[in-house]
Amino acid sequence: MKTKPLGGTGVQVPEIGLGVWQYRGGVEPLRHGIELGANLIDTAEMYRTEDVVGEAVRGMRERVFIASKVSGDHLGYDQVLRAADASLRRLDVDTIDLYQVHWPSRSTPIEETMRAMAALVDSGRIRYIGVSNFSTTELTEAQAALSHHPIVSNQVLYNLRRREIERTLMPYCQSHGVTIIAYTPLDSGKLAGGGLFSSRGTKVLREIAQRHEKTPAQVALNWCVSHDNVIAIPKSDSVSRTAENCGASDWRLSAEDMARLDQAFA
Ligand SMILES: NC(=O)c1ccc[n+]([C@@H]2O[C@H](COP(=O)([O-])OP(=O)(O)OC[C@H]3O[C@@H](n4cnc5c(N)ncnc54)[C@H](OP(=O)(O)O)[C@@H]3O)[C@@H](O)[C@H]2O)c1
C-alpha cells in the first residue's frame, strides 16, 4: 500500500483508507483491510460505528490511524470536549489520531471551536486537527483561528463524477500542505459497476480497467489518489470488496488514461 504524508506532520498515511459510514460489516473487513495496509479508519460520532472500530483495532491499536469527527451541530467549546470524550470511550482508546470538524457551523464562531480543538491536542486526547466539508474560505478562517496547531486535512466529496474541488479547494490544499481525504470516492458504489453502467464515462472506465486487468472500482480509486495530496476512504461491508479496494494502490494509471477519464467524465 502506497502512503502519503498527512499535512506537514511527518506521519505517513495509506492512500486508501477505510470509511465506516453506514458500515455493517463487523470487524473482519476492517481487520482484513488493516492487514493489507489500509490502516486508516474514518468514523464519526454521528456514524454510530465507533464501537465496531474500537473492537476491530483491539490488540493492534498502535498499527492503526483512527480518524473521527465531531458533529457540526456540537461545535461550542464544551460540546467539542464532551463529544471527543464520548468518542474516546466508544472507540475505547486513549487518543484519536485525527479529529475532524464534520461540517462548518452557521452559529458557533470558528474561533470557539478551534480553541476546543487546540485544547484537545494540548491534553493529548487527539493528535491532529482536521476539518471536513470546509470551503477554501472556511479552511483559511479555521487555520487563522489556530495559533499553534496546523489543520492537516480537509475531508471532502471527490470522485470521477464529483469534481467541484478541482477549481479552488484542491489547488489551495496542495499548495498549503493540507491533505485531501476524498469521501464517497466510488460515488456510493456507482463507479464500481453497479447500476448505471451505460454512460460514456463508465464505458471508458470499464475499458481502462480491462486493459490494466483491474476492476472499475480500482481504476476509480486509483484516479482519485493519483492526484497530489489526495487519499481516499471507500466503505465496504465485505472482506473481498475491501481487498479489491486496497488493490487500487501500488500501481498507477498512465497520464493518457488519466486524460481519457478526465475527458469522459468532464
Ligand atoms: N465527511 C463527510 O461528510 C462524509 C460524507 C460521506 C462519506 N464520508 C466518508 O467516506 C466514506 C466512503 O463514502 P461512502 O460510503 O459515502 O461511499 P463510497 O465509498 O463511494 O461507496 C460505498 C458503496 O460502494 C459499495 N462498494 C464499495 N466497494 C465496492 C467494490 N469494490 N465493488 C462494488 N461495490 C463497492 C459499498 O457496498 P458494500 O459495503 O456492500 O461493499 C457501498 O454501497 C464513508 O464511509 C465515510 O467514512 C464522509
Image (spheres, helix red, strand yellow):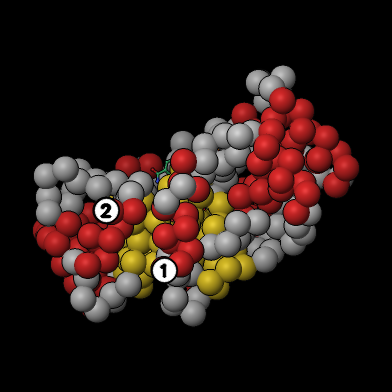
N-terminal label among 1 and 2? 2
Three-letter residue code for mark 1: His
Is ligand 1 within 8 Å of the beta carbon of the residue shown at mark 2?
Answer: no
Q: Which mark is residue 113?
A: none
Please state if 41 lies on the left or on the right of 225 as rendered.
left
Which type of secondary structure does the marked residue at label 1 adopt? helix
Can residue 64 be seen here? The reply is no
Q: Which mark is residue 138?
A: 2
Q: Image point 42% across, 51% down: which residue?
A: 168
250 or 38: nearer the viewer: 250
What is the x, y in percent for residue 35? 67, 62
> Marks 1 and 2, how far apart in space?
14 Å
In the rendered view, tell whether residue 151 sits above or below residue 124.
Answer: above
Three-letter residue code for mark 2: Glu
Q: Residues within 10 Å of mark 2 (few under 14, many from 20)?
A: some
Q: Residues within 10 Å of mark 1 (few under 14, many from 20)?
A: few
Please state if 262 lies on the left or on the right of 69 as rendered.
right
What is the x, y in percent for residue 48? 37, 42
Q: Which quarter of the picture shows residue 122?
A: bottom left
Residue bearing mark 1: 176
Q: Image point 46% across, 41% down: which residue?
A: 164
Q: Image point 16% across, 43% down: which residue?
A: 106
